[in-house]
Amino acid sequence: MWQYEKKLQYPVNIKNPDARMAKVIISQLGGPDGELAASLRYLNQRFAMPYGEVKGLLTDIGTEELAHVEMISAILYQLTKDLSIDEIKASGFDTYFVDHTTGIYPVAASGAPFTVEYFQSKGDIITDLHENMASEQKARTTYDNILRLADDPDVRDPIRFLRQREIVHFQRFGEPHRTG
Amino acid sequence: MDTERALLKKIMQYDFTLKELDLYLDTHPSCSRGLAMFAKFKKLREAAAAEYNDKFGPLVPEQSKNLRSWDWVSDPWPWERS
């Protein structure tokens, strides 16, 4: 079972709201290579894993991804807090606002709602580990793209932390392929 | 002395009691009876969890004590038949 800790894995403190940034960063919540898909991918796959080390890895990374869902949500919350209606209209955030106000709802940057089609659980250790390595690289690319679009150091700092975690997870998912 | 399964069952019962009290206290934050019950079961849970950790291994990774091997990844896992 799970226990919640009342803290973020890494701090998020964004002073300036920016609805346009929220519109792209939301893809790492509800998009094709986002943190929600990552968490569900690993926490589902672990039941088919035959080795304790990999059951542990999937449990631990799947749990960490839930903390990343929370960090992305905190970024979105802070980026969209205290916006004026004029700012919402000017930023293009109005298309999200009309359905969700500033509530957190998992969608891709395109507006497509989250779907479980974003991940696989194939019941095969080799297939699943390769899926996971590819997914971590796709998420890393998405964070690279966010860093190309974001100027605010308050936004870039937690995004860089999350990008780095994709690289560590990629590395760890490669290691169970070694034998002996 | 408790077997592994009996002790784990006891911890699960304490945890469920604490979860129920947690939810109740969320909406009744100044109920002194609820607060006292929470404190009582928290103590029981801590003692049972410490005993479990000493005898049978970690319930969370942070409890791993073995300096020769990472016993967090030891089988069985909770979803497996025992």
Image: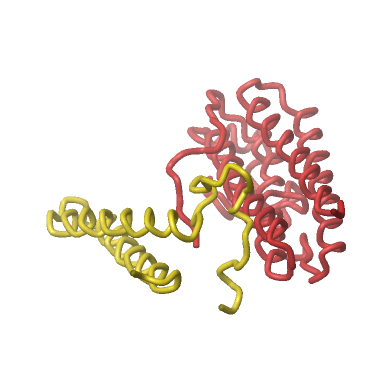
Chain colours: A red, B yellow
Task: Name the spot of residue B48 as percent of width and height, x first.
Answer: 34, 59
Q: Quadrant of residue B19?
A: bottom left
Residue at x-position 44% and y-position 59%: B55
- For this orientation, the residue located farthest to the bottom is B81
In the drawing, does residue A21 fall left or right of residue A88?
right
Viewer-proximal residue among A43 and A153: A43
In the drawing, does residue A65 fall left or right of residue B23?
right
> Is residue A175 in sight in this rendering?
yes
Residue at x-position 31% and y-position 55%: B47
> Is residue A114 in sight in this rendering?
no
- For this orientation, the residue located farthest to the left is B32
Vertical position of residue B14 compared to residue A165: above or below: below
Task: Name the spot of residue B13 as percent of width and height, x first.
Answer: 34, 70
Viewer-proximal residue among B55 and B25: B55
Q: Quadrant of residue A44?
A: bottom right
Task: Name the spot of residue A104 as percent of width and height, x first.
Answer: 55, 49
Disc tally is 0
Viewer-proximal residue among A50 and A107: A50
Viewer-proximal residue among B5 and A151: B5
Task: Name the spot of residue A8 as percent of width and height, x first.
Answer: 51, 38
Q: Quadrant of residue A50?
A: bottom right
In the drawing, does residue A148 fall left or right of residue B67?
right
